Image (tube, grey):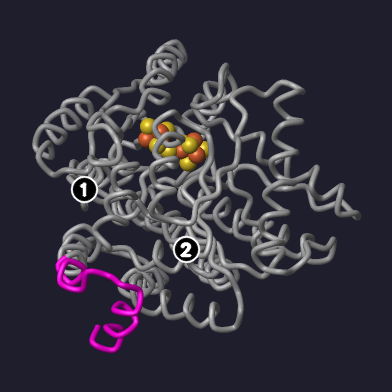
Amino acid sequence: QEAYREMWENLNLDIAAHDGLLGVLGKFYGDIYMSQKGRLQGMEYLDFVLSEVHGLRIKELQDAKAQGRKIIGTFCVFVPEELALAVDAVQVGLCAGADAGKEAAETLVPRNTCALIKSFIGFKLARLCPYTESCDLIVGETTCDGKKKAYEAFAEHAPMYVMEVPQTKTESARALWKAEVLRYMARLEELTGRKVTAEKLAEAIKTVNARRRALQRLNRLRAAVPAPISGRDVLLINQVSFYDDPIRFTASINTLCDQLEERIKAGDGVAPKDAPRVMLSGCPMAVPNWKLPYVIESSGAVIVGEESCIGTRNTRDLTDESGQTLEEMIDALCERYMKIDCACFTPNAERLDNVETMAKDLKVDGVIQYALMFCQPYAHEGIKVEKRLTAGGVPSMSLETDYSMEDIEQLKTRVEAFLETV
Ligand code: BJ8
C-alpha cells in the first residue's frame, strides 16, 4: 500500500479515510469470500484483482493517461463501451456499492434516494474513489429519475456528460437513441482527438462480444447440478468485468471456465446436490455490495443466476459482427443496446418473459427479487414479476434493502423462512 500512497495523494484522495475504507473492504472480503470452501484455483486471479482494485489497476489507468489515453467512467450498461475502445479510451464502471460519504451525499440529493446513487456521490464528495478521480469524462444516462437528477447535481463536482436513453422502444425512441449514440461518439472523438473508424469499431465490437461470450459460457457452466461455483464468486466476476482490462479479463474467465468443466465432469460442486437453487432478480449489485448473496448462501442455498445488470442483462445480447461499414456497425450497436430490458422502460414486457425463461432454464427452486430501497422502477416491476412467476409455478419473494448492515439478521430470517418453503 505504501507504494501507492503518492499516487493516491496525487489523485487528491482523503488518505486517512481511504486507508479506513480499504481496511473495512479487506475484512469484508475475507469474511465473505476467503472463508468459502472448495473455490476454483482460477478465482485467485479475481482475488488478486480485487486486492489491487485501488492499487495496480489505478496505476494502469495512470499509465494509460500518461500515454495520452482517456479514462471514461460510467454507471449504466447503456453506455456503449465499444465506442470508448474504438478511440483507444479505457472505460471503467464506477462502483457505487458501499455506504460511504452518505451524509455528504444527502447535501446533493434527497434522503429518499437509492443507496447506489448516494454511494457514487458520497465517494466523490468524501474523496474516496481513485476511479472517479482518474476519469476524464463521466457518462451518465437518463434512466431513472433518481439518476438523471443526481447527474445534474453531480456535474458541479465532476466532468459529466449525459446520454439521453429513451423510455420506450418505439421507432421514434430508436431514432432518438441512434442520434444519442452519434452525439456521444462525436464527444468521444473531440475528447480524444481520435476518429472512430470502421476498423477500430469492428475490433472493439469483437473485444466486448468476446467478454460477453466468456460470461455467457460461465453462466451456462454454473447451471450444472451440483452448482460448481458459488453465486458470490460469479457476482464478483461480473463486478470485476466492469473495471478490468477486457482482453485480460476474458482470457482469465475462459481459463476459469476450463476448470469448471473439469469440476463438472468430476461431479463436484460447491454445495450439495439438493441445496436450494436460487436466482436473484432486480437492481444491480455494484461492488462491494455482497450482503444479500452472502445471506442467501450462508443459509444453505446456492445462487445460480443473476437477472440484473451486474449479471445476465449485461451479457445476454451480443452485437452483430457482420457489419462492414461504420454506419452498419453503429446500427448494430444501437440495436443491441435497445434490447436491454431495464425497468426504466415502459412498457417492459420482455423482462417478464426473460425472468421466467431464465428461472425455468436454470431449474431454480425460487427467485429472490432484490430492490434497493427507494428504487421505483424495480419495486414497480417486482409486483409484475412476482405475479408472472407465481402463475408459472416458481416461488418467489421480494426484498428491499440498502447498503447498511443493520438489517442483516432480519434479511437472514426472511431468506431462511423462504428457503423452507421452496
Ligand atoms: S440499465 S438497471 S444499470 S439504469 S437502483 S439508480 S434504477 S433508483 S441502476 Fe441501472 Fe442502467 Fe437500468 Fe441497468 Fe435508479 Fe433503481 Fe437506484 Fe438504479
Task: State the image coordinates of residue 407 (x, y, percent, origin top left).
Answer: 12, 36
Mark 2 near mark 1, Cβ–Cβ under 8 Å? no
Amino acid found under the numbered disc labelled 2 = Tyr
Dominant secondary structure (helix, strand or loop) of the stretch shown in magenta = helix
- Magenta range is 1-20
Residue 265 visible in the shown view: no
Res 372 quadrant in image = top left
Q: Secondary structure at mark 1?
A: helix
x 79%, y 61%: residue:
202
Give the vertical position of 180 relative to 352 (above or below): below
Going by the image, does 362 lie left or right of 26?
Answer: right
Mark drawn on residue 243: 2
Camera-near label (2 vs 1) is 1
Q: Which mark is residue 104?
A: 1
- Ligand 1 found in image quarter: top left
Residue drawn at the location 60% of the way across and 74% of the way down: 69
Question: Which quarter of the image is occupied by the C terminus?
Answer: top left
Between 316 and 358, the one lying in front of the other is 316
